[in-house]
Image (cartoon, rainbow, N blue to C red):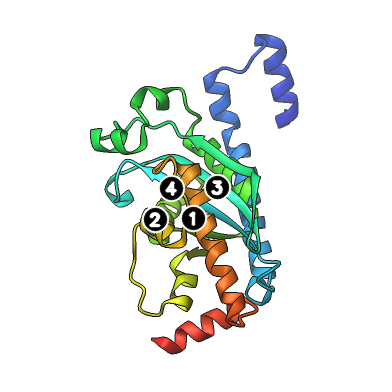
Amino acid sequence: MGMNDMVRFVRQMSGKLGSNIYAGLQPQTNAQQISFIRQLQKEMKQKNSLDCHLDELSVVVFDLETTGFFPEKGDKVISIGAVKMTGSQIHEKDVFYSLIKTDTPIPIEISKLTNIVNEQLEGAPEAKDVLIDFFNFIGSSILVAHHAKHEQAFMKKITLELLRVSFEHRIIDTSFLVRLANPLFQSSALEQICHDCGIEVTDRHHALADAKMAAQIWAFFLKKAQDQGYNNLREVYEHLSRQR
């Protein structure tokens, strides 16, 4: 009996799929998801984003809220927020946001910081479903994040853990462009850079709000990079590499 015949048979017998049957069908779903991620990875390799003019460069600026700072020690992602951009234009309505279900209790200090409580996450979507939705949203775009090493570490962990594939999207830190304007720049809190750039700080430590503020920072310094004569990311990379 083929897979489709089996599904029809089960539906006729029970009217719905039970948990044991779902377990039997799960490998097919996983194969589709893995194929989707690998297709994105193939598209990323084929794209020439480094030579794309900065006015036309498409990125997705995103932020994660987590239970801590160490994914390798069991800390979990509890929300993802993201917004799309083209050049310095922020697409305010083209956004992504979701809480993520987790069995790991949120530390009190994290709840106070993010205003996310354990009860909210009990009814939130499963992490795997959110991750697939997020990949659908970002496609093969370059990602941008503030303090990107934090986001990268968690994305690598959950992608490998939940989808069994490596995370290969390029993530650029907001400081990448900041250093063009200020070669002596040291890492600063999001709200400090916003203050320096005249960007209003709202709903700090909400993943989507933080992503939107990071997008404004990216837009601010992207314009400065263009004013300095840079046309694409490759020119920025080459300049910064000579500063080291």
**Please, what is the three-letter code of the amino acid marked with disc 2?**
Leu
Give yes or no for contact between labels 1 and 2 (Cβ–Cβ under 8 Å). yes
Q: Is residue 6 above or below residue 153?
A: above
Q: Where's residue 59, x and y in %?
A: 61, 59
Give yes or no for contact between labels 1 and 4 (Cβ–Cβ under 8 Å). no
Q: State which tag comes first along the sequence, 2 or 4.
A: 2
Q: Within 10 angstroms of label 3, few (less than 14), some, or many (20 or more) residues?
A: many
Q: State which tag comes first along the sequence, 3 or 1.
A: 3
Q: Within 10 angstroms of label 4, few (less than 14), some, or many (20 or more) residues?
A: some
Q: State which tag comes first along the sequence, 3 or 2.
A: 3
Q: Which residue is mark 1?
A: 214
Residue 57 visible to the viewer: yes
Q: Residue at x 57, y 44 (%)?
A: 134
Residue 164 visible to the viewer: no
Q: Nearer the viewer, mark 1 or mark 4?
A: 4
Q: Nearer the viewer, mark 4 or mark 3?
A: 4
Q: State which tag comes first along the sequence, 1 or 2.
A: 2
**Please, what is the three-letter code of the amino acid marked with disc 3?**
Ala
Q: Nearer the viewer, mark 3 or mark 1?
A: 1
Q: Which residue is mark 3?
A: 82
Which quarter of the figure has residue 184? Answer: bottom left
Q: Where's residue 203, x and y in %?
A: 43, 40
* Residue nearest the viewer, comparing 145 with 39: 145
